[in-house]
Image: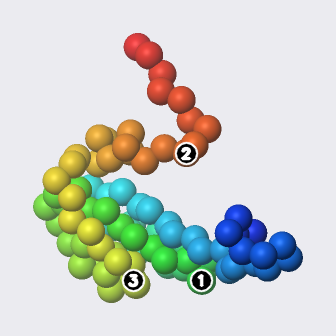
Amino acid sequence: MHAVDRGAPVGAATPLQVALLVPCHNEEATVAAVVAAFRESLPAARCHVFDSRSGDDTAARACAAGATVHPVALLARAMSFAVRSPTSRPTST
């Protein structure tokens, strides 16, 4: 896959880069399988796990599965609202 770089000459393409962002909180039982499935489906993608103050081995298991782990101070629920797709819109309650 290639994406057109707006600054490149017409017809030139640059490789598409994909990063997977996985927010986690106390997910030691499943995080390795999630990272492995992502890496199998998208082997060229970089997988980043954002560990939100887990009290278990989430970070160690994600790292062992090949993800780059980033410790964050946010709780997992708050993190899910911080990462949105460009087309998602906040809902009012």
Give the amino acid type for the residue marked by disc 2 in the picture.
Answer: Ser
Task: Please name the residue that numbered disc 2 is placed on.
Answer: 85
Residue farthest along the top direction in this orientation:
93
Task: Please name the residue that numbered disc 1 is placed on.
Answer: 44
Query: Which residue is found at the position 32% from the left and 47% from the top?
Result: 79
In the rendered image, residue 81, in percent from the top left (x then y), is placed at 38, 39
Alpha carbon of mark 3 to alpha carbon of mark 2: how far? 26 Å
Tag 3–tag 1 contact (CB < 8 Å): no
Name the image quarter holding residue 85: top right
Alpha carbon of mark 2 to alpha carbon of mark 1: how far? 21 Å
Name the image quarter holding residue 63: bottom left
Give the amino acid type for the residue marked by disc 1 in the picture.
Answer: Ala
Task: Please name the residue that numbered disc 3 is placed on.
Answer: 65
Residue 56 in view: yes
- Label 3: few (<14), some (14–19) or many (≥20) C-alpha neighbours in 10 Å: some
From what the image shows, is residue 89 above or below residue 92? Answer: below
Alpha carbon of mark 3 to alpha carbon of mark 1: how far? 15 Å
| Quarter of the rendering occupied by the C terminus | top left
Q: Earlier in the sequence, mark 3 or mark 2?
A: 3
- Image side of residue 19 versus residue 10, left or right: left
User: Nearer the observer, disc 3 or disc 1?
Assistant: 1
As helix, strand or loop, the secondary structure at mark 1 comes to loop
